[in-house]
Image (cartoon, rainbow, N blue to C red):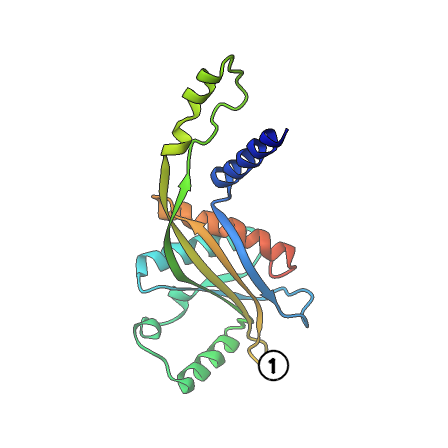
Amino acid sequence: MRYLIVFISVLNFSTFLIGCSSATLIHDYKNQDIESFQASRLLVVGISADKEVRQLYETTLVESLKKEGVNALKSITFFENSFTDQKQSLQQLNAIEKKLLRARVDAVLFTKITNRKDRVTLVNAYQNFAQSYQTFKNYYYNNQSAYLENKHEQVYTIETSLFCICPGQERELIWRGEMEVIESKRLSRNIHRYKSLLFKTLKQKKLVLN
């Protein structure tokens, strides 16, 4: 019986390794003074030196937000090129806040990649579990690759912050989340994985999305 328990534990662990989600919320923070928040107009900002990545990210997110009934706009078209091409002083940022208020933007969603790492995971562990093997030899032969195969995958840590830009109030943090996204070969798929988890989380927190 002891050996059976060990085997089941190993099987469960291997299933966890190969079945984990491609996007995971590591931890998040929500302002305790805010039970729910709906933005009248939300500015989406992708913080990236790669303009192509930023364009695709902001376009994808804004289009998806609009489908959810959120009045959202891209920072890449709202700001002049000089906003991201050079550092901004505190005085310049004050002027930008006033511009946002004039444009009736009352919330800003910032997203940036904070880390990228290489992770090794086990693949093809205990494959064909539902099949019935008649002998020990056949079972081991079909599963021995679990000892040998591993996969290197790139994992991105993505930080997203939601700020209120409300007249007469401090520009306070409403919510911040940190997510891990396993890289795929297609950038659009990476963004979709992140977006799906972000939207699910925001709905659970009663923020922006209903």
Q: Residue furthest bottom?
A: 91
| Front in this rendered view, residue 184 or 164 | 184
Q: Quadrant of the C terminus?
A: bottom right
Can you give x and y, in whole percent of width and height, for residue 175 in the image? 58, 66
| Front in this rendered view, residue 177 or 196 | 177
Can you give x and y, in whole percent of width and height, for residue 159 in the image? 47, 62
Q: What's the residue type where badge 1 is placed?
A: Gln
From where the camera sits, is residue 71 visible? yes
Side (left or right) of 95 relative to 37: left
Q: Quadrant of the N terminus?
A: top right
The residue under label 1 is 169
Quadrant in which residue 80 is drawn: bottom left
Can you give x and y, in whole percent of width and height, for residue 3 in the image? 58, 30
194 is higher (above) or lower (below) than 6: below
Side (left or right) of 159 relative to 167: left
Residue occupying the point 54% across, 61% down: 71
Residue occupying the point 53% across, 65% down: 42
| Front in this rendered view, residue 116 or 79 | 116
Residue occupying the point 56% across, 53% down: 199
Can you give x and y, in whole percent of width and height, for residue 134 in the image? 51, 12
85 is higher (above) or lower (below) than 67: below
Q: Residues within 10 Å of mark 1 (few under 14, many from 20)?
A: few
Side (left or right) of 3 relative to 96: right
Residue occupying the point 49% across, 52% down: 195
From where the camera sits, is residue 66 visible? no
Q: What secondary structure is found at the residue carrying circle 1?
A: loop
168 is higher (above) or lower (below) than 175: below
